[in-house]
Image (cartoon, grey):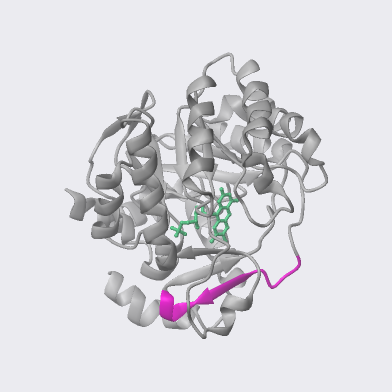
Amino acid sequence: LSFLYRNIVRPILFQQDSESIHDRTMRALAFASRHASLRALASAIYSAPTKPVKVFGLKFPNPIGLAAGMDKFAVALPIWECLGFGFVELGGVTWHQQPGNDKPRMFRAVEDRALINRMGFNNPGAEAMAKTLAGWKCSRLWPKHPVGINLGKSKITPLEGAAEDYASSFRLLREYADFFVVNVSSPNTPNLRQLQDKGALDEILVALQQINAERKPILVKIAPDLSFEAIDEILELAMQRQLAGIVATNTTITRPQSGNPVYTQTGGLSGAPLRQRSTEIIRHIHEQTNGKLPIIGVGGIFNAADAQEKLEAGASLLQIYTGLVYEGPAIVKTIVEGLR
Ligand SMILES: Cc1cc2nc3c(=O)[nH]c(=O)nc-3n(C[C@H](O)[C@H](O)[C@H](O)COP(=O)(O)O)c2cc1C
């Protein structure tokens, strides 16, 4: 199936602008989500065997999840389990709705199996997201696997107001997800990554834990461009503020040595060129915490060997974005079968 996708479907899709394809694909998946026959068809072709894991108190049917940024509007929530995913991370969502950066803002570096994006948290806002999720709850199409939400900071909110911005989104959305990811690592919101500094991050985590009566797992997603020293400071906070884990990593602002003109585009780079750095960071976190802090590994996973590398480095769960674009929807099944 991946062979068919790579050689027939992908060349047709890749003739078009990458965000247009993304939007069309999401519309098709949203449509399929609402039709039992299409869900059944997708499951028949793509559902993955089980490989259960229990992490931060939640049961995952398999360790492969959908990374943040794919289903930003939660329009296709029921389809992901039909495509084999063991969990999803919806969003990033911000307190205020926002259009994101000007288009074009998503680019492919096909030879390197990479993407560059500068979306800038285009999203419907926390309130609209809550409504969509309430609709899914009522529809009885809510998936059986854990659902996470990726929280970002609204562009119009100054850094000093960040804690309240995250907390407002969390207050509204906390009943709709099993775990939450504080995203302070997107390169596409001005100065956002400064919130990875100890003081600023602590303020956000205190604000969230104060209103986290149900003790939902809260994780922090970090940039691959941080030094190990900076990561160690975040790990200290993780212990102090009872974080459930770390998501490692977001996209990188570094670029490979290559003449590909697409690398002059501003934004975050994902896919194969990110794989090694992301794995190094997972290994570092695992060693520093003696394996006690769960890690969701993400960055450049395309096949079972890439997945195995990150599990061996210390990740308990994994996520995929760019791999799905390049390998197609059979990727989850192929990886889970490979891991088994
Ligand atoms: C178009 C696009 C949008 C993304 N949006 C988000 C986001 O909203 N929040 C977030 O934490 N990460 C976001 N990411 C980062 C991914 O979740 C993931 O961390 C990164 O792409 C590395 O994984 P990959 O190599 O499998 O793509 C986005 C990535 C892409 C390509």
Q: Is residue 313 left or right of residue 261?
A: left
**Residue at x-position 54% and y-position 15%:** 214
Residue 196's x, y, as percent?
61, 40
Q: Is residue 289 above or below residue 44?
A: above
Furthest-left residue in this view: 340
When asked about the image quadrant of residue 263, the answer is bottom right
When the figure is inspected, residue 92 is found, relative to residue 225, above or below; the finding is above
Front-most of residues 245 and 107: 245
- Horizontal side of residue 157 vs 252, given as left or right: right
Residue 272 location, x and y as percent? 40, 67
Please tell me which residue is depicted at 75% across the width and 34% down the height of the picture: 165
The residue closer to the viewer here, 315 or 325, is 315
Residue 3 on the magenta segment: no
Q: Position of residue 35 (x, y in %)?
A: 47, 51
Q: Is residue 170 visible?
A: no
Near-viewer residue (136 or 181): 181
Residue at 52% x, 20% y: name it: 240
Q: How many marks?
A: 0
The residue segment tinted magenta is: 102-112
Q: Split into 4 quadrants, where in the image is the N terminus? A: bottom left
Report the residue that reaches farthest toward the top.
213
Q: Is 109 included in the stretch rendered in magenta?
A: yes
> Which residue appears farthest toward the front when viewing the image?
229
**Looking at the image, can residue 95 be seen?**
yes
